[in-house]
Structures are given as C-alpha cells and as structure tokens.
Image (tube, helix red, strand yellow):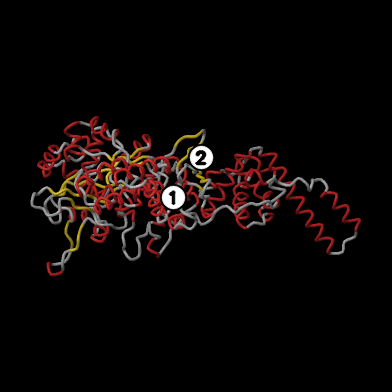
Amino acid sequence: MPAWNGERVPKFSEQFIQQVAQATDIIDLVSQYVALKKRGAEYAGLCPFHNDKNPSMYVSPAKQIFKCFSCGAGGGVFKFVELHERLSFPEAVRHLAERAHIPLPRDVEAPVPDGTPTKQDLHRLTAFAADYFHRTLLSPAGRETLEYAHSRGLTDESIQRFCIGYAPEFWDALLQAAGREGFGQQALLAAGLVAPRDQDRGGGCYDRFRNRLIFPIYDIGGNVIAFGGRALAANERAKYLNSPEGPLYDKGANLFGLNWARQAISDKEQAVVVEGYMDCVIPQQAGVGNVVANLGTALTDRQVKLLGRYAKEVVLVYDADAAGEAATDRALEMFLAQQLHVRVARIPDGKDPCDYTLAHGGEAMQALIDQAPDALEYAWRRRQGELEAAGDNLAKRRAIVEDFLRLVVSSSAFGAIDEVRRGQLAQHIAHVLNLPAGEVQQHMRRMGRAIPRANPLPGDAQTARTSPRHLPPAPGTNPTYLAQRHILESLLNAPDLFDSVVEQVGPVDFDDPALRWVAQEVWNRGSRGHLAVEELVACEVLAELGALVADMIDAGHRRGNHEQTLRGAVEFMTYRRDRQNMQDLKATGMSDDVLRQIGKRCQKADPRRKPMAGGS
C-alpha cells in the first residue's frame, strides 16, 4: 500500500492501534501466508523473510508474536505485515484495520490530494465489480450465459463459491453501474476494469470485459484483485482476457484458486498446478481441493516460492501438447531450485484436467495425481521417445541426452536427488549412448560447476530485500549488556514483577540505545499499571524494534526463573551504579571515612554475580 502517495502519512491514536491489534489474531494472520503446524503451545512454519527450508519461524498465540530463529525477524502483527507487504507502520495499521472491517478515524480518511485512488478504494471497487458480474449472471440478462456455464459442468454451488459472473455485451455496462456507486473513471482505469478510448473516437473509457464469463481472481487474503474473462462469442479473437497488472494485481506473484486451496495444500503438503481457470475450478468442485492455476503466463519464481510456503511436493498437470511440455520443462528446474519434490501427471488422450474430471470424476483425477511419476522419470520417458525418433543421428541423440543431463545435474545441485540416484542415472545414460560411465560422470561434474547451489550466500537479493532492518544486537559476554537484557526479558515475561524493581533501576540505567528505548516504554506502561506484552509489541514507539522485543520475550520465556534472574540482574546494575558513584565522589576529593560509609552499601551485592550469557 503506497504511503499516501508521499503526501501525508496518517497518524493513528494509541487507542485505535490497540483496537486493531486486539482484533487481529496473529495465528490467523500468519497462516494466510505460511502453513503453520502446532508444536506444543506454539506454531511453527517456514519463515517468509528468508530462503527457509526447515521451519524456523515460531508464532505464539499467547504473546501474539512471531520469531524466526534463523534470520532474526520478529515482532507482532503490525511488524509481520510491515515486513511481508513492505509497508510503513501506519500503512500496516490501516491494512489490518481494513482486514478487520474497523472504520478508520475521520481525521485520517481525508482524500489523497491528487485524487489518486488508494488501495482501499480499489479493493472496494473490485469487490463491487465481482458482485456486479455475479448478480448479472444470475439475472434474466445472464440466463443464456448461466445455461452455458451449466453446460460446461459448473454447478450452482461452484458458481456461488467462486463468484463466477457475466460481463454483458455492452460497451459501458460496468462503467455506468460503478459510476452510480460513486466510482470514478480514474479508479476503474487503475483497477483494469475499463480501457481508454482513442481521442479520435471521442475519448473517455469503455468496459474491458464484454460478453464474457467472468472469473474473479483473489489474493491469498481473499480480496478480489483482478478478473479473467472467457469469451462467449465463437469469433472472439482472444478466448481468454485477463486484467492488466496494476496497483492490486501482479500476475507473477499470485495463483488462481490459492485462497480456496491453501488449507488443503497445507494439510496434504502437496499442491497440484494446472494451466486454466476451469482446470482449477472443476477438480476443486469434484473434491480435489489442492489445485491452483497459474495466471495466463509461464510459472514464475515468485509463484514457486509462494507454493513452497505451503507444500513440500508439487504435481504439475499441464496440457500434453508441445506448449504444455515446454511449460513443464521450464517449471521443473524452478521447483527443484526451491527443493520441492516435483511429479508430473499426464491426462490420457490429450484431455485437459477439466474435461477429464467431468468425464471420469474426481476420484479418477485424484488417482492420476497419486500415480504421477517424479520429475526425472517423466523427463526421461519423454526423451526416450525423442531418442527413438532421432534414430542413428548421433548429434541429435547427444543433444537430447545433454538436455536431460542438465536437469539431472540441477536436481543434484539443489538437493532433489542424492548421489546414489545420480550415479544410477549416469550408468543408464552411458548404456543408452554406448559410452563409458566415467565419461558421463565427468561431463556431469563439468556441468555442475556452472549451476548455483541451494541456500544462497548472505547478500542474496531476495533476502536482502525482505530481511528486517533491525535485528537483535549480539549480546556477546558483556555483563552490563546482559544484565540490562535480563531485566527486560524478565519483565516482558512476568509483568507483575515490575513493582519490585521500579524504585531500584530505570531507563536511564540502560546504556544500549535500543534497550533504553524498550525500557522507556516498559517503564511508561508499567508505571500506569498497563504492562501487557501483546500491547507492547503492537505500539508504534517500538515499531522498528519488533525483532529485538520478540527475541527478548522468547529468551526470557526459555530461561524461566524470572524472579531470580531479575533479582540478580538488578543487584548487578545497582552495584555497578553505586561503584560508579563512588568513583565520581572520590574524584571530588571526599574523605576516606565518608567514602567507607558509603561503600558499605556496595558490599551488599556480590560483584562476582555476573549475568550469564547462555540464556540470552
């Protein structure tokens, strides 16, 4: 969400911020983006802020925080949205307020100065358009189109569930309907619902979708972001027409049907990827719930990474024509690079998933998916046919095998196959080509040197772009730093202990700037009797220190013994402060007798009781 086009960033009250935080459950929020598994009192999942292969992010429903033990990302609900959507704190508050259907305060609802529609405006518009198309399909004007939808196998339940609609055969039907609801042409253009008319034809705009069966496209959060339209006229040049990319829609970062399939994918740890809207809708209608479709283009790295958050295995079910084979080959290496197990299913008789499911049912479709060979087996089967067609042409045969070897080497480099399997494949290829196995192995090693390995080095562009800016500082073994951390860690986990330390230490005693900032907020809230962790991680003052706060909450929770830890850390801090005061007094020339009397206070604390680094 843009920062109000650079003109004005809204300022929300603390009361409103806490209202939004309380209305947002962190488990519900994070699980929209990441598949979470319950582990004791917490949930674990793959961290979306680095190239995570083993679940290293934990989410606590009790404390309403997330924490990644690999990259250090952490914080509350606002920090998660900030990092994931790359928003500022006020934008994250606004985003979650809209999600919770909490009206924004009047003083931040002023229109954008240049009239540019906000994302909230566009979301309202696309939701209206989806409802308009759907109502039109169910109206007398959509009777023929509804009959067509039924003839294609769509049930009334699916039409309702997927909000399928009809764009009537008029140049301005949606334009007029949206105008009556107060939506202007600028918003309609930004949402891709209308297109500008040439000036020599009078200017203005016209409806982009006309005489088409409409499929709304949703993001993972269930918001309508775009539309796909299937032509109803036989002479239409474009069988399918999709929304252009814009402020809401990035086709390379979304997948059709994922908002409905996400839970099934997470439960099965498997995603089935098809090519078209109907290829996704009909199998889902028949009970194959983990199906998604790419959006009219070749699969992208971002879509692969998106699926990798929910699935460990992907089954590709593309058309069996030349274009489908080429799309499958392109997709294989991307999935292998993400260390996802890949299998490839082929529909008999050249049918697509929609037609096959309608003809044979969901159980038959599921059986094809279950029996699909893995990627390398599929790739080799296909190339065997090509080798037979090549006959005695040695150059063609070598080129075919070379292509397969690249896939094998990529699979090995990305950890998709082990060395034993790689050796077996090399032996088999050597036999087919009538070459020594050692020569094939040597050639594969040369090819492997040109392929990047899995787990990118520090500085990887994706990691650098999404990693949090403020990671917790390394505590090292500095006893003063550790004592200060231990005080905050204990208070964050046992707020009821605040009264026992408030008179002994304060924020001014914290040397580290980040710790002092946290301490100031802890003391402010503790002094008012409102020291609640879930409110602390949601406050704007600590917005940039979410990872540090989450790290201290977790470290204190794991150490336990909050009262004993707090007492020892406070004793060390007061001893250190008194010693510093003694040195300052000595520098003033005060007599030894007076200094000895003052020094008795310092002897109450044992200077050898230094905080231990092991618990941080």
Q: Which residue is mark 2?
A: 60
Residue 200 position, x and y percent, is 12, 70
- Report the residue marked by disc 1: 454
Q: Secondary structure at mark 2?
A: strand
Residue most extreme to the top: 363
Q: Are marks 2 and 1 in contact (CB under 8 Å)?
A: no
Other residues around mark 2 within 10 Å, as few (<14) / some (14–19) / many (≥20): some
Q: Amino acid at mark 2?
A: Ser
Q: State left or right for residue 94 relative to residue 555.
A: left
Q: Residues within 10 Å of mark 1 (few under 14, many from 20)?
A: some
Q: Earlier in the sequence, mark 2 or mark 1?
A: 2
Provide residue 201's location: percent of width, then percent of height.
12, 67
Report the front residue among 31 and 453.
Answer: 453
The amino acid type of the residue labelled 1 equals Ala
Q: Examine the rendered structure and indicate whether residue 386 appears above or below residue 245.
A: above
Q: Quadrant of the N terminus?
A: bottom left
Q: At x 32% / y 44%, what residue is drawn?
A: 429
- Seen from the viewer's position, the closer of residues 4 and 312 is 312
The quadrant where residue 490 appears: top right
Q: Which residue ends up furthest to the left in the rendered image? A: 235
**Quadrant assignment, res 510:** bottom right
The percent position of residue 38, horizontal first and vertical second, equals 47, 34
Can the viewer see residue 98 in this picture? no
Mark in front: 2 vs 1: 1
**Direction from residue 465 to residue 516 in the image, left or right:** right
Which residue does the image show at 46% across and 49% down from the upper left?
A: 80
Element under disc 1: loop
Please say if 538 is above or below 37. below
